[in-house]
Amino acid sequence: MGKRLILVVDDNKINRTLLTRILSHEYRVYGVENGLQALEYLKEYCGEVSAILLDLNMPILNGYEFLEERNKYLPLCNIPIIVQTTHSGLDAEIACLEMGATDFLTKPYSPKVILRRLKNIIMLRENENFITAVQHDSLTNLLNKEGFYVKASKALNENLDTKYLLLCIDIVQFKVINQFAGYQNGDKVLIFVSEILKELFNENALIARFTGDRFQALVPYPIDEQYIDDTIADYKRNPPVDFPLSIQFGIYEIQDRSIPLATMCDWSKMALTPIKGRYKIYFSTFTEDMNKRLQKEQLIVSQMDEAVSQEQFIVYYQPKWDICKNEIIGAEALVRWIHPKYGFMSPGDFIPIFEKNGFISKLDLYVWEEVCRQTREWLDKGFKAIPISVNVSRNDIYSKDLIDNLTALISKYKLEANNIHLEITETAYSQSQEQLTDVVKQLSDNGFVIEMDDFGSGYSSLNMLSEVPVDIIKLDLLFLNKKSADSKNNKSILKLIVNIARELNLDLIAEGVETKEDLESLKEIGCNKAQGYYYAKPMNAKDFEKMLKS
């Protein structure tokens, strides 16, 4: 079992920092600034929190108000609360005891007292009698997380001849239901789903509500997927809320009972990943490939900050060519991760992870600075100024610091804004049209050249051209490389795009040019600028400099 989680509720940042330092050797600590934030966090993670340290005097929702609200939500009543008071707080202590507080902590803090009191109340909560009293989720009357671990471990140890499955059950878009229908209706959905699960699985199954809308079940092998589909369909004829209800099942087949139960539960949850967001697909079974992908992702996430600080990320440059003059007219900056132990790590492995966890913005800023520094170096050596294009991710578009960061780098390295081109994908437009349009206009006003990357790969290309002030279209050669009977039509479409760019007075660059055939096709349709392996693969700054000299 990992470290227990303590929730610290205090608007004083110094107090939160001090308590975190005291507790972090023995516990995981999560801090919030007020009672409202605490309630929102607990509604999602109440099953994981072992104790709460609560300050009384806070804005928005103070300690007393928090205790009142907490008493309205039964699952929260099982979590012990230590209230922080002053020496003169006797009346406050009595009031808090009447409202359900468990213990008190006097300021200034004594580390030994804090740790001992926490240990005592957590031990009390976890002793056998206490667990028996609270091993069920009060909302659904299913087992809670702790009760499930106890009973499931016992079942696995005592029934060695029975083959079991672990199921992780997820309510699709439950957060949306809570948001639009309200928490009370969200609770009705949780109760409704718990009744479905009780109907689906016999008395030999163990069913629990873990956290939020996550349910877990230990059931004998096999399960009848058709019966499950039919039963859920019957229940959905009388839903508790006017909202489409869908349930998905992640399945883990237990083969090695020496693996920790918590780990196997996590694997059943991981099994849901491939079907998240997919319509009418309700079952997914855990595979070893999923585990390998998770381990790889965890490795990448654990080392990403160190990789930036140690400059393991290297900027490569892929030249852009004028087809008619046969000369370099620019380059695209591409990031590569050269790990000291694992060597080259494919961008296809780490970029999607960084886009998901937000680290892509930090990496982009790192690349922008390196490109500006390198451009300044080449200019100082007397090379002709050629624009280098850099990626601006969807995450960057939402950053309030985007324009300040870019203009600061241009100023720091004494460059012109048009030395750096900014590549923005059509996908970013399709997902945040108004935001993207506003940001691009501001970037253009500051002198930056905007390139629309992957043009033609989606459905919003023409809309984006009409609304967003782009300067250059980067044409996706998916059409040219598509080997099909309609290649003639594809070429006609490409020629039309060339004509549109010409009418709009936009530059056009074809990317992904890999063969002589690609090049001849571009010449035929009147596209005179290209980028791709036919001319040069991405290369480090030293090799690119040699190409500039030649």
Image (spheres, rainbow, N blue to C red):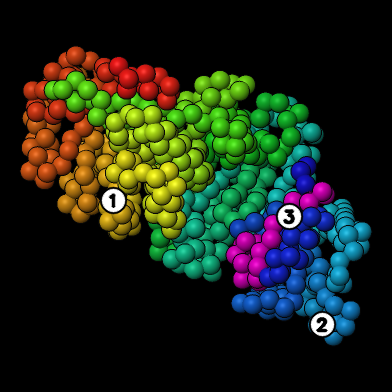
Q: Residue at x 76, y 57 (%)?
A: 20
Rendered location of residue 446, percent (x, y): 31, 54
- Give the residues drawn in magenta, as a range: 24-43
The question of residue 27 being in magenta is answered with: yes
Q: Quadrant of the C terminus?
A: top left
What whole-number distance in Å separates the C-alpha atoms at marks 1 and 2? 61 Å
Q: Residue at x 19, y 48 (%)?
A: 465
Q: Earlier in the sequence, mark 3 or mark 2?
A: 3
Rendered location of residue 64, percent (x, y): 72, 79
Q: Are marks 1 and 2 in contact (CB under 8 Å)?
A: no
Q: Residue furthest bottom?
A: 91
Above or below: residue 193 compared with residue 378:
below
Above or below: residue 375 compared with residue 538:
below
Q: Residue at x 74, y 65 (%)?
A: 14
Q: Disc 1 or disc 2, which is closer to the eye?
A: 1
Please indicate, yes or no, whether residue 39 appears anywhere in the rendered image: no
Q: Are marks 3 and 1 in contact (CB under 8 Å)?
A: no
Q: Is residue 524 left or right of residue 366?
A: left
Q: Is residue 522 left or right of residue 340?
A: left
Q: Earlier in the sequence, mark 3 or mark 1?
A: 3
Which SS class for mark 3?
A: strand
| Mark 2: amino acid | Ala
Q: Residue 127 sits in which quadrant?
A: bottom right
| Mark 3: amino acid | Val
Q: Which residue is mark 1?
A: 447
User: Residue 29, labelled with which disc?
Assistant: 3
Q: Nearer the viewer, residue 146 or 383?
A: 383
What whole-number distance in Å separates the C-alpha atoms at marks 3 and 2? 25 Å
